[in-house]
Image (cartoon, rainbow, N blue to C red):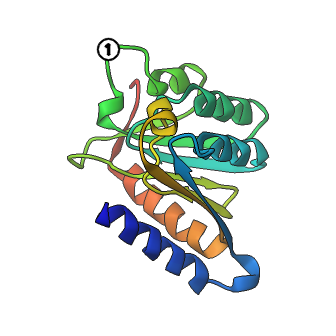
Amino acid sequence: MKTKTILFIVLLLLATACKPEQTSWKAYFSPKGGCTEAVVREIEGAKISILVQAYEFSSAPIADAIFLAFKKGVKVKVILDKSNVTEKYSAATFLQNHQIPVWIDRKHAINHNKVMVVDDAIVITGSFNFTKKAEESNAENLLVIKSKELAKKYTENWEEHKEHSLHFGR
């Protein structure tokens, strides 16, 4: 619990350290606190790009929203933890089958990130895994931060992880 609280405070401080007129944030908490709906809403509003970096990803509503954004021309790229490579049909398989580029981070013991960067301006992050269980059963948090400065830092980090990740399905 201490780690989640510290993460929340650090992210809040980062968000408020940016220019106040350009930064806003919303916090959500699960279970049943609207985290999935908030993620889907931001994805649906995407016009240019979505970068995803996720530890667990099995939420059908989030995967569907990503696919629909991709279908309307939004550039989508996804990095997932190696635990998403299973013999069962997974979000990695679903996204790859819909021509969405997916990489698997095999360098780290766990790629524990739960991040999306939307249109180089919005960061979605927190302890919230992109799963049904995270929305319905777990105690998790989600921040939606509108900050181009913060989005740039998260994009740089995403690119660093992509460099050591393997393209899924190849």
The residue at 53%/30% (across/down) is: 59
| Disc 1 residue type (three-letter) | Glu
x and y, in percent, of residue 135 in the image? 52, 38
How far from the left and from the top, in percent, is residue 23?
69, 75
Residue 55 in which image quadrant? top left
Residue 98 location in percent, x, y? 60, 22
State the image coordinates of residue 148 (x, y, percent, origin top left): 66, 71
Q: In this view, does 159 lie above or below 20?
A: above
Q: Residue at x 43, y 15 (%)?
A: 89
Q: Is residue 91 above or below residue 138?
A: above
Q: In this rendering, would 36 be left or right of 44?
A: left
**Alpha-carbon neighbours of circle 1 within 10 Å: few (<14), some, or many (≥20)?**
few
Residue at image point 58% right, 76% down: 15
Left or right: 146 in relation to 155? right
The residue tagged 1 is 87
The quadrant holding residue 129 is top left
Of the 4 image quadrants, the one containing the C terminus is top left
Q: Which residue lies furthest to the left in this view?
A: 109
